[in-house]
Amino acid sequence: MKQDMIVILDLGSEENPRLAREIRALGVYSEIHPHDITLAELRALPNVKGIILNGGPNRVVDGVEIDVSQDIYNCDIPALLVDHKGDSPWPENAEERKQALSNFIFTICGAEANWNMENFIADQVELIRQQVGGKKVLLALSGGVDSSVVAALLIKAIGKQLTCVHVNHGLLRKGEPEQVVKVFREELGANLVYVDAVDRFLDKLAGVADPEQKRKIIGAEFIRVFEEEARKLEGIQFLGQGTIYPDIIESGTKTVKAVKSHHNVGGLPEDLNFALVEPLKMLFKDEVRACGKALGLPDSMVYRQPFPGPGLGVRCLGAITRDRLEAVRESDAILREEFAKNGLEGKVWQYFTAIPDLKSVGVRENKRADEWCVIIRAVNTVDAMTATVENVPFDLLQHITARITSEVKGVNRVLFDLTPKPTGTIEWE
């Protein structure tokens, strides 16, 4: 790795990711490591120019205050103690923090601002080639941001040694499976195995109304399909993964409890025996997007909205039926098209349609028509823990309603969800 690095040693702070992002924003690479790293392990990291000892409310573990080893205090690498309990004053003001960090990083440590996406990509290409050699890599390519960026990076590094498997489970948004094929097979020349598993998934889901049960069926079936495809291929020794830095951080450190467990393409059988290739594992989400842009992926892929793993399966509420699923897909496409036309595409964090398993009486061609209703959801959030509802102009809502009720088969009503989180969640299931 060519970039200079500032290492954050975790002494019980919950501010580690924020600090790492602030350092990277100054153009210097930063990583978070546990407090009990040895001096030898620290020296083995490439181009370490400085250390930040980042203390905080979780510094006392099992009644004992944790600290780094005396060797690290005594070594010649410049160190800064930051304690968020207030023992060492650390500015909260963003501009003052930036100034304090700049002074430490550039003046005291003499680091260079050489962390950028081009250098990152060049380093990763080299590291992937070293790790993989002449062997083959398999990647589950969902069409989501992380898997798409990993695919593009692996294609740049090892070309045809990569095989991408795209499983179409019938629960993707309109045009997404076609876009994956177009971008990766036609434009990037990838070895792409396209698996049409729509009937297989929808048959398994028939009559299942419980959201958790739907999720489990979709997850388990995906693993089965992917495993079947993996067994057809010969000589695969590596599995590419879209793991990103928040996945690792959220799995918990020695002082911070896990937010969620991090699953590698969860549950593949042991006898497949793949080693993992995870080239994005040190990137935050905005950096993953920047990497995708630098690799030439289209904006529609790079800035794709957060999308649940079970896809439209949790937006076709209750037991999934094919006609209602199609209505969700079509109404969602209309909503996205109208938001893009009216300047809301980049402004609103997430917007989608959902259709409950509920019919109401309406009028179509002067006759009574029992049809479904479409619910529009449009929310803004910073961290997905809380969310506010976007104030969508009323005339636009009327226009979208007119389009959905005239263009989407089997729908006679459109409703707008006004509920923030809490009390509602972002998704309905």
Image (tube, grey):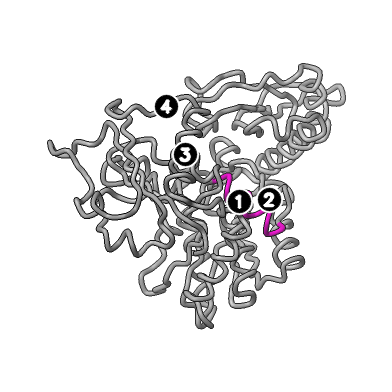
Q: Image quarter for residue 181?
A: bottom right
Type of amino acid at the residue the image marks with label 2? Met
Residue 293 in picture, x, y percent from top left = 68, 53
| Residue at which label 4 appears | 91
Check residue 93 for magenta coloring: no
| Residue at which label 2 appears | 301
Type of amino acid at the residue the image marks with label 3? Asn
Q: Image quarter for residue 264?
A: bottom left
Q: Residues within 10 Å of mark 4 (few under 14, many from 20)?
A: some
Q: Is residue 421 left or right of residue 60?
A: right
Q: CA distance from mark 3 to mark 1?
A: 35 Å
Look at the numbered discs 1 and 4 and tell me whether their residues touch, using CB distance below 8 Å.
no
Look at the numbered discs 1 and 2 and tell me whether their residues touch, using CB distance below 8 Å.
yes
Residue 225 in picture, x, y percent from top left = 52, 65
Q: Is residue 259 left or right of residue 422?
A: left
Type of amino acid at the residue the image marks with label 4? Pro
Q: Nearer the viewer, mark 3 or mark 4?
A: 3
Q: Nearer the viewer, mark 3 or mark 1?
A: 3
| Residue at which label 3 appears | 103
Q: Image quarter for residue 165?
A: bottom right
Identify the residue shown where x is 31% and y is 33%.
83
| Residue at which label 1 appears | 145
